[in-house]
Image (tube, helix red, strand yellow):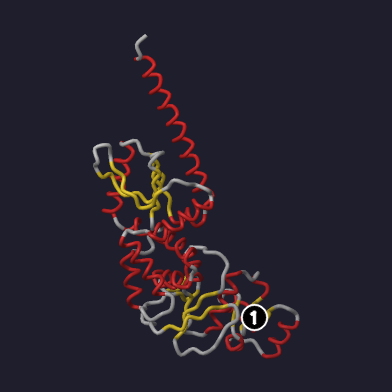
């Protein structure tokens, strides 16, 4: 085997990227390096080398940034979640590095981390932070609306729990982005879902939907409390509920919600349920569903009124 063959095998095993030091350590001479670079067999990218015959991909870019960040670097945030199997879209490579790291890498976000004690993992040949830690980093760096979508998805998959997230917030309490995340955790755990209601209200106002009351008590004809609806139309007897992410993590609350929904349906109410992901990613579907419910309720109301008129007519003296 020639030194060039050894180098190619080494780079392919490394996912198509290497450093100059690594290449020279695996049999590549300075002259061969210059020749390969001149004929385009490998190219320099952000301080490392990429073998062009390996069909570079977005993952190749991630490997290059991680290698450039140094031996103690670990993927975290969205980049780590992608390797775990959750694609959150294109964005900068997010890397955890020791607090003492001073270098910068174009196209990458370096999180200088004071807490480096947890066990790291190897996924697809790259070192990554744990899944739960990566989730926290993704959430604290994301805009509020994107963070809520991420939160909804990771909880739906069972990748974390409210308790685990709170523990990480306490452990990383001095890191940026955590106050907002802790506030959302507190809102969701208290059951207020204030943020979801505000978002739903804005959607409905933009759509021109009127006559709705938020956080309203719903009572039966005998004044029995049936529940408190997130969004209620008393005339049409429609309730719109938004299941916040804490809903996924509490079995008792899940059971209470189901009991309440059954009581409302038995009392003649129509109940629509949406998730945070629906509000953020599919607002048009949410509004269309509410409009269909309004049409159905109006149709039912007309039929009831006609039936009442018919009954009165039949009972009038001739």
Give me the residue at 59% from left, 85% from top: 19
As drawn, is 159 to the left or to the right of 204? Answer: left
Against 18, is 139 above or below?
A: above
Compared to residue 24, the image places residue 201 above or below, namely: above
Q: Residue at x 51, y 81 (%)?
A: 110
Residue 215 versus residue 149 in the image, above or below: above
The number of numbered badges drawn on the structure is: 1
| Image quarter hosting the C terminus | top left
**Relative to 81, 308 lies left or right:** left
The image quadrant of residue 22 is: bottom right
Q: Secondary structure at mark 1?
A: strand
- Closer to us: 211 or 138: 211
Give the image location of residue 295, x and y in percent. 49, 36
Q: Nearer the viewer, residue 190 or 87?
A: 190
Is 249 placed left or right of 295 in the picture?
Answer: left
Q: Position of residue 310 (x, y in %)?
A: 40, 19
Q: What percent of the width, then of the height, locates residue 101?
A: 49, 88
Return the residue found at the far right: 39
Residue occupying the far front of the picture: 317
Q: Is residue 68 above or below residue 57?
A: below
Mark 1 is surrounded, within 10 Å at the Cα level, by few (under 14), some (14 to 19) or many (20 or more) other residues, namely: few
The residue indicated by pointer 1 is 45
Q: Where residue 125 sits: x, y (%)?
A: 50, 73
> Residue at image x 35%, y 49%?
229
């Amino acid at each position: 085997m020639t030194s060039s063959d050894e180098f190619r095998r080494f780079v392919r095993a490394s996912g198509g990227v290497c450093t100059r030091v690594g290449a020279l350590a695996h049999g590549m001479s300075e002259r061969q390096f210059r020749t390969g670079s001149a004929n385009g067999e490998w190219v320099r990218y952000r301080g490392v080398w990429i073998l062009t015959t390996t069909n570079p991909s977005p993952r190749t870019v991630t490997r290059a940034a991680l290698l450039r960040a140094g031996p103690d670097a670990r993927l975290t945030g969205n980049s780590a979640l992608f390797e775990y199997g959750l694609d959150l879209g294109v964005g900068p490579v997010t890397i955890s590095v020791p607090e003492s790291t001073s270098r910068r890498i174009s196209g990458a976000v370096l999180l200088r981390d004071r807490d480096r004690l947890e066990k790291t993992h190897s996924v697809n040949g790259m070192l990554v932070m744990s899944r739960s830690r990566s989730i926290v980093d993704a959430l604290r760096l994301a805009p509020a609306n994107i963070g809520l979508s991420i939160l909804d998805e990771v909880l739906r998959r069972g990748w974390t729990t409210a308790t685990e997230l709170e523990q990480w917030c306490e452990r990383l309490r001095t890191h940026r982005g955590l106050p907002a995340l802790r506030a959302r955790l507190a809102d969701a755990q208290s059951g207020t879902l204030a943020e979801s209601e505000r978002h739903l209200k804005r959607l409905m106002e933009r759509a021109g939907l009127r006559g709705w009351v938020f956080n309203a008590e719903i009572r039966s004809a005998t004044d029995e409390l049936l529940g408190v609806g997130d969004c209620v139309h008393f005339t049409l007897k429609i309730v719109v509920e938004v299941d916040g992410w804490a809903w996924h993590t509490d079995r008792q609350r899940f059971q209470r919600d189901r009991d309440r929904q059954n009581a409302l349906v038995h009392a003649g109410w129509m109940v629509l349920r949406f998730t945070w992901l629906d509000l953020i990613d599919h607002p048009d579907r949410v509004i269309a569903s509410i409009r269909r419910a309004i049409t159905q309720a109006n149709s039912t109301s007309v039929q009831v009124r006609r039936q009442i008129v018919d009954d009165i007519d039949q009972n009038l003296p001739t």
